[in-house]
Image (cartoon, rainbow, N blue to C red):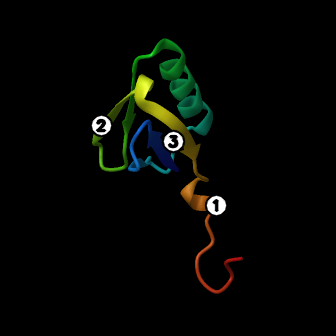
Amino acid sequence: MDIRIGIVQSMKEIDVELPTDADRDKIMKEIEAALSSEKVLWLTDRKGRRVGVPASRIAYVELGTPASDRVVGFGAA
């Protein structure tokens, strides 16, 4: 699953590729908890790297579809 985080007053975005077995509902709850408490949102990507973003700097969060749902090639719509 891919997550894109927009940062306040910045044109850059943070893209994090989570492991394929990441629980979407659990990730959404972690994001909501960080945003409501003004803490740091910590995510671990597929390679095991930790990414921390201060909740006060988050403008938006996009949750992508799980990697297994993607269609690649001539059958893609």
- Residue type, numbered disc 1: Asp
Contact flag, marks 2 and 3 (Cβ < 8 Å): no
Query: Callout 3: helix, strand or loop?
Result: loop
- Residue type, numbered disc 2: Arg
User: What residue sits right under mark 3 in the picture?
Assistant: 22
* Above/below status of 77 relative to 10: below
- Residue at left offset 64%, top offset 61%: 69
- Residue at left offset 64%, top offset 86%: 74
Q: Which mark is residue 4?
A: none
Query: Nearest the camera: 59 or 30?
Result: 59
Image location (x, y in percent) of residue 51: 32, 37
Q: Work out whether mark 1 precedes mark 3 in sequence or the reverse, and give the earlier one.
A: 3
Image location (x, y in percent) of residue 40: 37, 23
Residue projecting furthest to the right: 77
Figure quadrant of residue 63: top right
Circle 2 or circle 3, nearest the eye: 2
Q: Work out whether mark 1 precedes mark 2 in sequence or the reverse, and give the earlier one.
A: 2
Query: Nearest the camera: 16 or 26?
Result: 16
Q: Work out whether mark 2 precedes mark 3 in sequence or the reverse, and give the earlier one.
A: 3
- Residue at left offset 47%, top offset 42%: 5
User: What residue sits right under mark 2 in the picture?
Assistant: 50
User: What residue sits right under mark 1 in the picture?
Assistant: 69
- Residue type, numbered disc 3: Ala
Image location (x, y in percent) of residue 29: 58, 25
Between the C-alphas of marks 2 and 3, the distance is 14 Å
Q: Quadrant of the C terminus?
A: bottom right
- Residue at left offset 48%, top offset 21%: 34
Query: Callout 2: helix, strand or loop?
Result: strand
Number of marks drawn: 3
